[in-house]
Image (cartoon, rainbow, N blue to C red):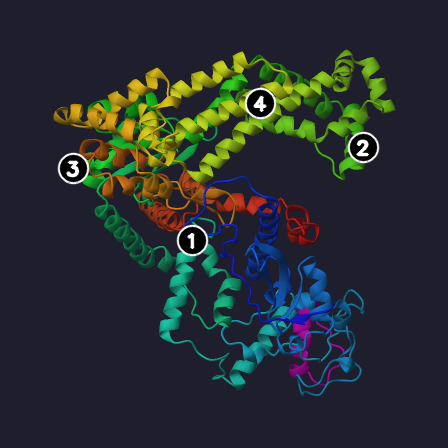
Amino acid sequence: MAATNTSTQPVTATTTPAAATSAGGVDSSAASADELTAKAVHKRYEGLVLVRTKAIKGKGAWYWAHLEPMLLHNTDTGMPKAVKLRCALCDAVFSASNPSRTASEHLKRGTCPNFNSVAKPISSVSPSAAMASPSSAPHHHNHRKRSSSGGAAGGGGGGSASSYHVSPLAVVDPSRYCGELTYSPSVSATTVATAIAGSLLPQQQHLMLSGGKDDLGALAMLEDSVKKLKSPKTSPGPALSKTQIDSALDYLADWVYESCGSVSFTSLEHPKFRAFLNQVGLPSISRREFTGSRLDARFEEAKAESEDRIRDAMFFQVSSDGWKPKNYGVFGEDNLVNLTVNLPYGTSLYRKAVFISGSVPSKYAEEVLWETVTGICGNVVQQCVGIVADRFKAKALRSLEIQNHWMVNLSCQFQGFNSLIKDLGKELPLFKTVTERCLKLANIVNNKSQVRNSFHKFQMQEYGYTGLIRVPMPEYESMNFAPVYTMLEDILNSARALQLVLLDDAFKIASMEDPITREISEMIGEVGFWNEVEAVHSLVKLIKDMAQEIEAERPLVGQCLPLWDELRAKVKEWCSKFHIGEGPVEKIIERRFKKNYHPAWAAAYILDPLYLIRDTSGKYLPPFKYLTTDQEKDVDKLITRLVSREEAHIALMELMKWRTEGLDPVYARAVQMKERDPVTGKMRTANPQSSRLVWETYLTEFKSLGKVAVRLIFLHATSCGFKCNWSLMRWVSAHGHSRVGMEKAQKLIFIAAHSKLERRDFSSDEDKDAELLALANGEDDVLNEVLVDTSSV
């Protein structure tokens, strides 16, 4: 493969694409063909960076240690135009279309002049080289004498079951190790014994061990002991300084704590892990140290940092997530309620965790929430602007709002959209019909052997695998639509196989003998059945996708009304596509909207400069025309509630002025300036804090209304935040009655959540692992299926 030297340096993963053409951002516009091409190129670049990052961490191919992705830009437009791979050893540049082939041709075949000078990974050594005879091995690595009559490097492959041939070829030198003898997992015990025999028994050609191959480990220990006695002061390498050791152990502790249960403390004392520490020059560590003084110190450090940030803010919002049971109907199922503090400048800080079992009464939730508020600000409770929670809007949140007139307590929008799916499953006739028919189909396919065998035969023929259709448990079916949605997905994904089953002779015989099977046969053959299944699946996916975007984006309260308007528009399109009447669906959506609605939605939408609309005269005015009459009244009522009685009429007069004059066009455009997100490619607000800052710095004439605006605009509309690992939750379930155990769990969760929120990482490690394992062929799927090849752009 031809390679050219270039001085172009690799672009890091944080490089923003040139689609954002100015430092301040650009106004929103339809994506051009060039932008789409640039987005596709950048997507491939990000994918290669992701694959390389995982590989460097040990979850990918060896060659990524030497190949670096590069993003090349068009010199005229500045937009991304191609992705290349740069060899880190010789600076040669290659096409990024096939990294594996590039590694084979450039690295393995010796084209790279510097590759032979670095240590090669075991995975890059060909099997033929690994099985080479001792006489053909290079001699410049080891000057010991080698027996000319040695066998294969495998050591025991050519003898009988009870005979183990050990060649005196020294592959591993045990004198390198002190403390605990360790070996690479890729080196076999036989190879180790081969190395040992070379020094321990140099004259013996065929070593017979009475214990068989199980004696090889003991033989290795014996050789290690001999080596230590001969040269007791041998060091494995340059010793680390105390500062380096302390720094390394601090990083290790942070990683263990921030994994929040994924890495067990017991694993710190695993022999292999201790051997690793010894190999890199670190001392052995005790799990008691990591669960004792070190944990306490790290917790106090994170807590002090959090307290300082809260004290700096003038006001805050409490976020509470986890009240809604994750597993419906499971008695005693432990839930973790996360209590977080949202600050005006967009930062979220973890406060504490509350462990509950199953469903809890509203009064208990109210007490926990109020204790959290007073624990943060003491008697100055006006600092708490409000609470957002995933449950108890009608009772606990409403009660606290009535008792404290300055509070704005919201229900989580992520939960609201998920509850809408459940409403549709219970109330929309189409959902009930499709669910019943699909359950009947799935049960016949899964339970009737003749049908199941035919189904599996065509599954294997069409998809290369076999499996049953996943069926929801009857007790969960009415409480949660997610298992039903999974069943619909399985049926749609197996549609071709199910239709081929109708042509199978065994199935034809079964349908003649059984009326239910005959009914299923007719149903599979109906076009209307498949249209209905696709319609239900499509609507649920539409809402789920919006919910997932809400969870990821964490919108503020001013975005609630536009979100529900967007949902209504998408549902109308869905009704038109599948020829379904709009009335019943709209009725269910409106009922859920009213359950979630809060007057603060309308007030924040009006007061946030982000949503100002330019009129014909050039003014940027609040979008009152998009509010209903009732919502306009809600704006007046909420503003008068949030100010003192003396200021109420002043605030309303300022609201009228805001309605007629709006904001200076220059400031309005500055607030609404957008830039392209380098990761997702979406257009985002360039400075999210500018909506609030413009009220505090420029719109100072609105003294009463300004106080309301700055306290409303920053409020979060979701309670989504830190996700705890199931491994820790299982541990909590087992030690829930231990005071010391629960204290340690609280500290672990606080440290992990504090770190994740600081990085704005709201994902779960389990979700990331599931996404990784879901790739059938690992990185090949990422490179060949998910990403767009630059050659096709």
Asked if the residue under mark 4 is in contact with the one under mark 3, i.e. CB atoms within 8 Å, the reply is no
Residue drawn where x is 24% and y is 48% of the image: 307
Q: Point out the frontmost of discs 2 and 3.
A: 3
Q: Earlier in the sequence, mark 4 or mark 1?
A: 1
Q: Point out the frontmost of discs 3 and 4.
A: 4
Residue 251 percent coordinates (x, y) = 41, 62
- Binning the other alpha carbons within 10 Å of mark 1 as few (below 14), some (14 to 19) or many (20 upward) gives few
Residue drawn where x is 85% and y is 19% of the image: 508
The Cα–Cα distance between marks 4 and 1, rounded to whole angstroms, is: 37 Å
Q: Amino acid at mark 2?
A: Lys
Badge 4 marks a residue whose secondary structure is: helix
The numbered disc on residue 573 is 4
- Binning the other alpha carbons within 10 Å of mark 4 as few (below 14), some (14 to 19) or many (20 upward) gives few
- Binning the other alpha carbons within 10 Å of mark 2 as few (below 14), some (14 to 19) or many (20 upward) gives some
Residue 380 in the figure: left or right of residue 752: left
The numbered disc on residue 457 is 2
